[in-house]
Amino acid sequence: MIEVQGLSRAYGEKLAVDDLGFEVRPGVVTGFLGPNGAGKTTTLRMVLGLDRPTAGRALVHGRPYAELADPLRQVGALLDAHAVHGGRTARGHLRWLARSNGLPDARVEEVLARVGLTEAARKRVRGFSLGMRQRLGVAAALLGDPPVLLLDEPVNGLDPEGIRWIRTLLRALAAEGRAVLVSSHLMTEMALTADHLVVIGRGRLLADTSTEDFLARHGRARVRVRAVDPVRLAALLLGSGAAEGLVAEPADGGAWEVTGAEPERIAALAASAGVVLYEIAVQQDSLEEAFMRMTADSVEYRAVAA
């Protein structure tokens, strides 16, 4: 597993990571989320020994990364899909990585096939699209068949088929018992892929919980209602409904979104007032909506609306 313990990193007076602690367990896809500038990439770099912590430590299998024997067999990582020599072919790039870690050339062909780059193996990387570079980066991460994987924004540049492929791949790798840590800004994908979430903001830990519990705690549930007579429904919700503690907001299509009551209570209130409903449904915030609400105070770069 990966263990992050009291990890901090300062750049001058700016504290990019502040006393961060969490674990990434085997058999689980852990989503690593946070606004831009939250410290995600800095944290991943410290786990991989590329940046030195100001305080605390990051361990893989109970050791700092620099102390691992045959690191490519222990940890696979993709931090920057562009960090590849453009003059090399895809096969050549993977072969020098394999030989530097005592891996057979046959393994190169296996990972090229797994990421769908067999036909492009002889092409030079400078001609690759971002999506192809991402696939090559994933191939390099898988080269040593490692039990731990760290991937930073692996779906950037992928088409819909590629996004679905990486989602299936990550879940399959976790099902094999690997610890998978993946950073992404695509909340829809994280909702479909991650079993567990670690959320940070301004370098500090904001949440460390299952995806289901995160949605239950930070997502907002509301009841969407529509009536045959929208005027009478509005009067009911803003009148006697408000007096009973219901909070109603207008929504699209003449509907209202109501919080403060279960759908059964809202239906009974409408029936007692003779308001005929033709839609009543419980709606739950998406992961994106819950994430935006939870991290609203931790956004470092915020544009001003025109």
Image: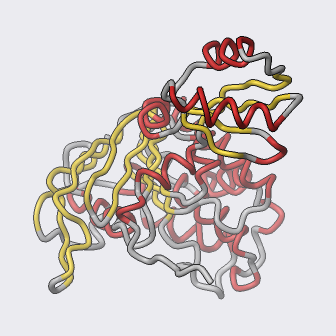
Residue under the point 59% across and 26% down: 240
- Camera-nearest residue between 217 and 28: 217
In the image, residue 35 sits, relative to residue 31, either above or below, namely: below
Q: Nearer the viewer, residue 140 or 204?
A: 204
Residue at 75%, 24% in the rendered image: 280
Measured as percent of width and height from the top left, residue 125 is found at 69, 79
Label total for image: 0
**Foreground of the two, 100 or 52:** 52
The x and y percentages for residue 146 are 45, 46
Instruction: Indicate left or right for 231 with 30 as reference.
Output: right
Which of the 4 image quarters holds residue 155? bottom right
Location of the C terminus (image quadrant)? bottom right
Name the image quarter holding the N terminus. Answer: top left
Nearest the eye: 267 or 232: 232
Q: Is residue 271 positioned above or below 48 on the image? A: above
Toward the left, the furthest residue is 55
Decide if residue 270 is on the left or right side of residue 199: right
Q: Position of residue 216 (x, y in %)?
A: 47, 31
